[in-house]
Amino acid sequence: MSEHMSPEEFRRNGHAAIDWIADYWASLDDLPVRSPVAPGDVRRMLPPAAPEDAEPFDALLADLDRVVVPGLTHWQHPRFFAYFPANSSPAAILGDLLSSGIGAQGMIWATSPAVTEVEQAVLDWFGEALGLPAAFRSDGPGGGVIQDTASTATFTALLAALHRASGGEARASGVGGGRWRVYGSTQAHSSLVKAAVMAGLGEQAVRVVDVDPATQAVDVEALRSAVAEDVAGGLRPLMVHVAAGSTSTGAMDDIAAVAEVAGTADMWVHVDAAWAGVAAVCPELRGHLAGVEAADSFVTNPHKWLLTTFDCSTFWVRDRTALTGALSILPEYLRNAATESGEVVDYRDWHPQLGRRFRALKLWAVLRTYGLSGLREHVRSGVALAQHVAGLVAADERFEMVTEPSLSLVVFRLVAGDEETMAAMEAVNASGEAYLSHTTVRGRAAIRLAVGSWRTTQADVDRAWRALQEAAAVHG
Ligand SMILES: *Cc1c(COP(=O)(O)O)cnc(C)c1O
């Protein structure tokens, strides 16, 4: 007997695994959204070593129920409103499963041409659906690539910017002595500082620029002064990070105005629309991307709001030679005629790692199974639910909005104060009824309620709101 599953066993276990997922979803409504376990609880239920002898696959499924589910915070729960959604829709899951079944390595075109060419087509389609400039298309000097995360995309953008600004010097001899500067607002995602650290520029290379207190968008005049001051001081502006939907409050920087400042110092403009970018599938929800024509790179995550199982971060550049110049490596064992012909794209040159999965399959599955019209409906329903929440906040004098609702994100607090706000949120989270997260805005505590899960209805939002009202009655 083979140690591998037979084709018949694979079919049977595969069906059981899909059944398990469908049953798991059906059970979610009755489970606490946030896992109640304490540190070590899960580990204690696992044996100290791997089994010496083979076990039936059913034993694994049984342990999912017994060991894993209690230790999960249920991101697909209809009342998961914390952070941002990480939607894993049925279509995306099947696309991902097919990718696993194919099991191809798409590191270069020649190792599986379809992996590269489907990805290029899907990114051209998706970029067009978002209204991105034609310069980002793969048939021009730019192109798109799927990265694991927006953090990697931002890191990659920084490496490309460094390559361009240093004329290749950074790649040859390192970044030492460059006295580089990278700019982002106080609301820029933490992955910007991490990128600077990973690129060897150091945290000090990141100059943090103030925001407008009301909108939390970058203060463009403060950016202008910072850049001018740095240039006068002999520093070299390298890249500016533009938040098109900040993580904390969904704040939207003015891309065109930032790009104008960047132009005065020949800086790379990276637009980080990790969460909010996908809303642009709706033409009426594209205002925050005005000016994106001036961007050198753009990232958005279908793996947040847009129904595509993590990980799927779509990243485009205007000029791919900066990227490939920074990252291409051609060891002898990967030499091949297609690469040498210059007619193909080898995605290994577009990101830090070599190996890559056929991630385009799940995005392809989502685009085809929902259609752009279905995706628009999903995005619009999230925005409508957020408006509904804003209405609930306005109608209860114990609560107040902290910033204007941004797409599907609502940020509010208890009028009573910071402690009361945090206590009310913690009470809701501990009850398991819903899961919310917090932030600070202008130095004060605030609750974030991010809608956008594929399983959330207005009844779920109302139930979360009732839990908040009950908590406010105690803590307000
Ligand atoms: C979520 C988020 C990120 C990080 O996304 P990852 O894909 O997890 O790296 C970056 N920027 C913004 C604005 C985000 O909302």
Image (cartoon, rainbow, N blue to C red):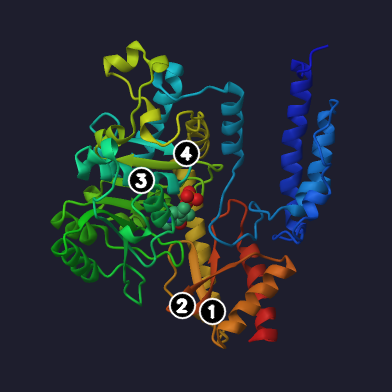
User: Which quadrant is the N terminus positioned in?
Assistant: top right
Q: Taking 163 as reference, is 81 left or right?
A: right
Query: Depth-wise, is mark 3 or mark 1 nearer the camera?
Result: 1
* Spot occupied by residue 452 in the image (x, y as percentages of width and height): 54, 56
Q: Residue at x 84, y 41 (%)?
A: 47
* Spot occupied by residue 123 in the image (x, y as percentages of width and height): 38, 35
Q: Earlier in the sequence, mark 4 or mark 1?
A: 4
**Type of residue at label 4?**
Gly
Q: Residue at x 35, y 77 (%)?
A: 213
**Mark 4: secondary structure:** helix
**Mark 1: secondary structure:** strand
As displayed, is residue 113 above or below residue 468?
Answer: above
What number is the disc on residue 413?
1
Q: Taking 220 as reference, is 126 left or right?
A: right
Tag 1 near tag 2, CB within 8 Å: yes
What number is the disc on residue 385?
none
Q: Earlier in the sequence, mark 1 or mark 2?
A: 2
**Mark 2: secondary structure:** loop
> Which residue is identified by label 4?
371
Callout 1 crowding tier (Cα within 10 Å): few <14, some 14–19, many ≥20: many
**Mark 3: secondary structure:** loop
Between the C-alphas of marks 3 and 1, the distance is 33 Å
> Which residue is identified by label 3?
130
- Which sits in the foreground, 17 or 69? 69
